Every structure is written in C-alpha cells, then in structure tokens.
Image (cartoon, helix red, strand yellow):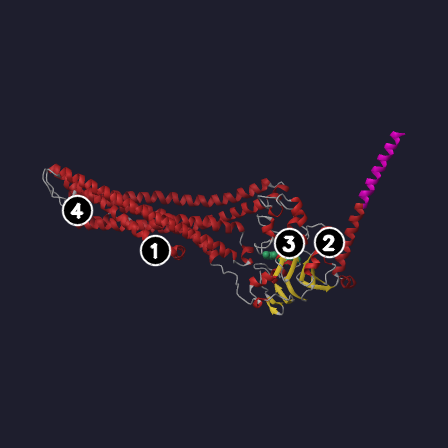
C-alpha cells in the first residue's frame, strides 16, 4: 500500500491525464460489454425467427436488450435480412468506438508516464547530487546506477502497461458481472465462484515474489557494481594479468543472481499453470451451469451465448490479475529501492554566508575527534591546531594519519564527533556548505577529470571564464606548455575515454589549475603534486608563491622538500598533532620530523650514489670502447 502511495506520488502531477485515460478506458470497456448483446440478439431474434418462422419467439427482458429491440425496426419476414445488416453495422460501430477510445486512452497514459518518468529521473539525479558524502561512502556506485536506470525502467513499464490495465480489468470484471447479474443472479455468482481462491493465491504469490525479487535485485546490484568497478580498473586487471580471476569473480556473482532468478521462475512455474487450471475450471463450471440453465428454461439460448462471453470476460481479468500482481511485486521492490535514495535526507545547505564577504582565512581545530560511520577506530584523536590568515602551513605525516580527513571535515563533507572547527573565529557548523565550499579551494588527493575538454575542466567552477584566465591558471600549474604544445586541439582537446589520456602528473596539474581558477580564500593542496617530478614541483611552488602570498594555504605532502619553505609545519600521527614549527625548529627538536628528514635524506643519498655509479659504469664502458678503437687504429 505504501508503495502504491509512492507510485501515485510519482504519477501525481499527471493525475488529470490519467483520470481522462481511465474514463476513456471505461467507456471503451462499456462498448466492449455491448458486443455480446448483439450476439445474443442475433441468436434470439434473427436465428430463432428463421428457425421457428415467426417473430419474438424468445424474449429477454433486461433493459439493454429491450433498448436495442426498441431501436430496431419491427421484425417482419421481409426485413429480417435488413435487420441482420443493421445489427452488423451496430456491431462494427461499437467495435470502432471501442478501438478509438482504447487507443486515445493508451496514448494519453503512455505520454503521461513518459513525462512522469523523466521527472522521476531528474528528481533522482538532483537528489543524488545533494546527498552527503557519507552516503556515497556506503553505497557502491554501480548500485546507484542500477536504481536510476533498471528500477526506473521497471516502474516505467508498470506505469505504462499496468496502471490503466488494472482499471480496465476492474471495469471489465465489474461490468461483465453486472451484465450477467441482469440476466440471472444465481448464474452470475456461479460464474465467479472461484474468484476468492484466485485472489488469495495471488496475494501469497505477490508476497513471495516481492521477497525473491528483492534478493534478486540485490544480487543484480552487486553484479552491476562489479562490472562498473572492473571496467574502471581494467588497467590494473590487465597489468596483473588477472582477467581470469575477474571472470571467475563475475561468474560467481552471476550465478548468485541466476539462483534467485531460478527461484522466481519456479514460483512462476507453480503459479501460472495453477491459475490457468483455476481459470479453465471456472469456465467449465460456467459452461455446465449455463447449459443446465438453458435446458431448465431459465435463460434463452441467446442469453446463454452472451452470458458465456461475459463469463470469459470475468475469468480473463482473473488470469491477468496474476500477471498484474507479479509485475506489481517487482514494481513495489523497484519503488522501494528508488525511494530509499529519495528519502535519504539531503545535505543541509542553509547557514551563514558571511554576508557575502570573503573569508579572512584563519582556521582553528579545537580538540577534534572523528571516526567514519560503521568504523571502530577514531581517525582523529583530538586534533588541535591554529592557522592564521594568510599563513602557509604544511600538514605532514604518514599515510593514514588523518590528513585528508581533516580536509574533509573542513569542507563539511563530514562532521566532527567531538570538538569544534572554526573559520574566522566562527564555528563552521554555522556556515552554509555551499558558501564554505565556494571559498575553500581543494586540490583533492585523487585527481579526477571529466570527459570533456581541458578548457571545460579547468573552468569547472565558472564555465563563462575567459580563456585568458584559464591560460593564466594553467601557467601557474605548469601545464600550459604541455596543453599548447603537445595536445592536438590545445585547450579544446577532449580528455578521458573519448580523447587523450593524461599522465598522473598532468592530471594533477590540470586539477590544480581548476582550483586556482576558482580563486579561493583558502587553498588546500592535498598531496597534489605527488605524481609530478621534483623539478616541475619546484617550479609550481615558485609560481604558486605569487598566487598564494596572501592566502591561507594548507599543503599536504610527503616529501620534506615540498614543505620545507612553509611558514609552519604541523606533523600528524595517528590522528594527533605531535609536533609543529618551522623546518629549522623541527630539525632542532630532533623528533618525528627529524626522523623522516633523515630517512628521506639517506634515501636521496642512496639514489644519488646509484646515479653516480650508473654514470661510472657508463664511463668505464666508454673507456673500454675507446681502448678498442685505439687498438684497431694502431
Ligand atoms: N570514507 C572512509 N571510510 C572509512 N575509513 C576511511 C575513509 N576515508 C579514510 N578512511 C580511513 O581513515 C584513515 C585516515 O585516512 P586519511 O585521512 O585519508 O589519511 P591521510 O590523508 O593522512 O593518508 C585511514 O586509515 C583510512 O583507511
Ligand atoms: Mg590523504
């Protein structure tokens, strides 16, 4: 019932169209119900007339039949052929009207359904855009895709075919029953005597199907998620020659889905033949009862002919009910799955926007604790730090120390469990999310680019940006030369699946340009030059200095060389600040930072030694070569 309400909500905006379609459908069914009456009259009047040689031998006295008798000219032996033609024409007209009303009805309902589905897809996508990061952390992308496509399609099919169909079935059932009732009450009830059994069976079928279908769809979700992940990681798969492993994994999941598919099939294979048996038993009962009623003189042969047609009209919805119920079961599941997205609360976008002013850029973490949902351990264990406006601060620490998490909290992707974060002295909970995110520019650790042109990627924050500004940002990010010299269409080059593939370092630089173009008040570089070579990184830093001179800047990096010239370095470990100071102060301190420094220096020394050795080998070989040459000359 709840899902029915939701379905009405989805289709609600077009209710007048659906009402019109239903009315047309009811009219169409009305016409259809008249057809057996023509049959009845043909048998009772004309055929009986010919057989017995006199008129009105058999009479039926229900109002509809009487109306037709009244319309038709008086039956005489001379005009009986004429009346037969009249009846034929009436029959044709009824069929024509039935067709036209039916067609208009289905056109209106199909068009409304398409509109409703478009709106549903738009609404789903827009809702997804506004869901919190937390949600995406928990839900696999493939599953969401499945819900936005497969499930919407299930609802679409149901709404197109079955919503009006159910009205049609109900009308036919009630209408045909009334027609039978008008002829003979007892017979009418005999013709639907198995109906309660059918309803009960359908109800159980509906419940069971819903159960199985939910499981089936969950397995389908996993399958979609698997394909999605596999295709995005196909490079890794190939690099590790793990194709067969992936195929096995897929086959296993596919088998899971098939199992539930088979269960569904088994349920159907019991239900359908069962319902067929019921339907045909019902028809047989009607047939026998009808014959008995005719022989008993309770109804005419013509009435019996019409009656039996009505009896099949009544049993037909009974059979279709099963299909309706089956699709309703699947649709119910689809609607529930769609609504589990739609009913998830959106991110709150309200709050203070600093009265439209820029941020000065002071940041303060005050004893902040945080853990990810469903995780055991705290990721941040009382982080306390202060960053002054315009200061350039580095966050340094081993992988997993919580650096990126700190940035996520700053962007209000997540909320601290305890403690407080302040920007410009104000609790960040008070700021609106869009405001904060528009003022803080983050170059995320994992560079992500859209499959459009480089230009559009860089100008993501404002598509109307003038090309000169785009070039300016690209120059600072040290990617301009590559774009203009190496890419086929310069800034219009399409990147991604249908265009050029960028190296990790190039991607990072494009994302850096994208963030710089936004001209944020606070700039955060989360490991954003990790894939760039040291020389280029140095140049980027030099160019950045001009841009970030007065901006609060947070640099997250692993290499000491990347953070050395920051105003202050904050060292983190296991979600805590363990040291802070300038490079010199921290070296002096002889703590964690000094340890990392020593390791990095010794690694560098080793590398340099290796390089030296390599050039020695080169020198040696060239000496040998020279000796040989010398000998041959001599
Ligand atoms: N979305 C998430 N859900 C659960 N755990 C996470 C999530 N993101 C990060 N973590 C965990 O939090 C810890 C800190 O991660 P992160 O802040 O990315 O560290 P860092 O940036 O310092 O390398 C890691 O142990 C990581 O596994
Ligand atoms: Mg990180």
Instruction: Using the rendered view, name the quadrant where residue 466 is placed.
Output: bottom right
| Real-space CA distance between mark 1 and mark 3, rounded to the nearest whole angstrom | 52 Å
The CA distance from mark 2 to mark 1 is 67 Å
Q: What whole-number distance in Å separates the C-alpha atoms at marks 1 and 4?
A: 34 Å
Q: Which residue is mark 3?
A: 513
> Is 628 colored magenta in this rendering?
yes
Image coordinates of residue 418 in percent, x first then y, are 60, 67
For label 4, the SS is helix
The 10 Å Cα crowd at callout 4, few under 14, some 14 to 19, many 20 or more, is some
Q: Are marks 3 and 2 in contact (CB under 8 Å)?
A: no
Could you tell which of marks 4 and 2 lies nearer the N-terminus? 4
**Label 4: which residue?**
68
Which mark is nearer the camera, 1 or 4? 1
Q: Which mark is residue 538?
A: 2
Crowding at label 2, few (<14), some or many (≥20) Cα neighbours within 10 Å?
some
Closer to the chain start, of discs 1 and 4, is 1
Residue indicated by mark 1: 16
**Disc 4 vs disc 3: which is toward the camera?**
3
């Amino acid at each position: 019932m709840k899902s029915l309400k939701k379905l009405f909500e989805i289709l609600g905006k077009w209710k007048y169209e659906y009402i019109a379609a239903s009315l047309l459908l009811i009219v169409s069914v009305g016409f259809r119900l008249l057809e057996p009456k023509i049959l009845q009259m043909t048998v009772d009047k004309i055929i009986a007339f010919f057989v017995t040689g006199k008129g009105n031998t058999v009479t039926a006295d229900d109002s509809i039949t009487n109306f037709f008798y009244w319309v038709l000219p008086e039956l005489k032996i001379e005009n009986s052929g004429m009346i037969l033609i009249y009846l034929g024409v009436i029959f044709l007209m009824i069929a024509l009207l039935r067709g036209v009303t039916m067609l208009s009805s289905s056109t209106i309902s199909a068009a409304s359904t398409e509109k409703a589905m478009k709106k549903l897809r738009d609404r789903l996508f827009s809702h997804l855009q506004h869901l919190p990061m937390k949600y995406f952390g928990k839900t696999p992308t493939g599953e969401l895709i499945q819900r936005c496509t497969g499930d919407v399609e299930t609802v679409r099919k149901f709404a197109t075919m079955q919503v009006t169909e159910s009205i049609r079935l109900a009308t036919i059932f009630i209408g045909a029953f009334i027609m039978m009732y008008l002829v003979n009450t007892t017979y009418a009830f005999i013709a639907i005597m198995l109906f309660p059994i059918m309803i009960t069976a359908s109800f159980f079928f509906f419940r069971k199907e819903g159960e199985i279908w939910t499981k089936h769809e969950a397995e389908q979700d996993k399958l979609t998620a698997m394909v999605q992940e596999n295709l995005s990681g196909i490079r890794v798969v190939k690099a590790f020659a793990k194709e067969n492993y992936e195929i096995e994994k897929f086959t296993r999941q596919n088998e899971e889905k098939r199992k539930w598919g088979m269960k569904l099939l088994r349920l159907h294979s019991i239900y359908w033949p069962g319902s067929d048996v019921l339907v045909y038993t019902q028809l047989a009962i009607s047939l026998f009862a009808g014959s008995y009623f005719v022989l008993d003189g309770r109804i005419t042969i013509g009435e019996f002919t019409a009656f039996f047609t009505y009896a099949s009209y009544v049993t037909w919805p009974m059979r279709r009910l099963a299909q309706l119920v089956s699709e309703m079961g699947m649709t119910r599941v689809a609607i529930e799955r769609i609504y589990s997205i739609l009913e998830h609360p959106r991110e709150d976008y309200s709050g203070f926007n600093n009265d439209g002013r820029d941020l000065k850029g002071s940041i303060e973490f005050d004893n902040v604790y945080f853990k990810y949902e469903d995780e055991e351990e705290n990721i941040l264990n009382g982080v306390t730090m202060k960053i002054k406006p315009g200061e350039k601060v580095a966050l340094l620490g081993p992988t997993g120390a919580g650096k990126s998490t700190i940035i996520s909290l700053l962007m209000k992707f997540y909320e601290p469990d305890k403690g407080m974060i302040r920007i410009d002295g104000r609790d960040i909970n008070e700021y609106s999310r869009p405001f904060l995110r528009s003022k803080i520019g983050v170059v995320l650790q994992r560079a992500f680019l859209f499959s459009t042109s480089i230009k559009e990627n860089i100008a993501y924050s404002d598509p109307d940006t003038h090309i000169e500004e785009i070039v300016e940002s690209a120059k600072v990010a040290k990617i301009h030369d590559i774009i203009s010299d190496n890419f086929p269409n310069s800034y219009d080059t399409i990147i991604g699946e249908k265009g050029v593939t960028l190296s990790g370092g190039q991607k990072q630089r494009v994302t850096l340009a994208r963030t710089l173009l936004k001209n944020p008040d606070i700039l955060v570089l989360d490991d954003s030059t990790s894939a760039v070579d040291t020389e280029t990184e140095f140049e980027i830093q030099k160019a950045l200095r001009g841009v970030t001179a007065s901006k609060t800047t947070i640099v997250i990096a692993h290499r000491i060389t990347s953070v050395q010239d920051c105003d202050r370095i904050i060292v983190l470990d296991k979600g805590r600040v363990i040291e802070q100071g300038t490079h010199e102060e921290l070296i002096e301190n002889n703590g964690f930072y000094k340890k990392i420094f020593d390791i990095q220096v010794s690694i560098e020394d080793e590398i340099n030694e290796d390089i030296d050795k390599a050039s020695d080998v080169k020198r040696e070989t060239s000496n040998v070569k020279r000796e040989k040459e010398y000998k041959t000359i001599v």
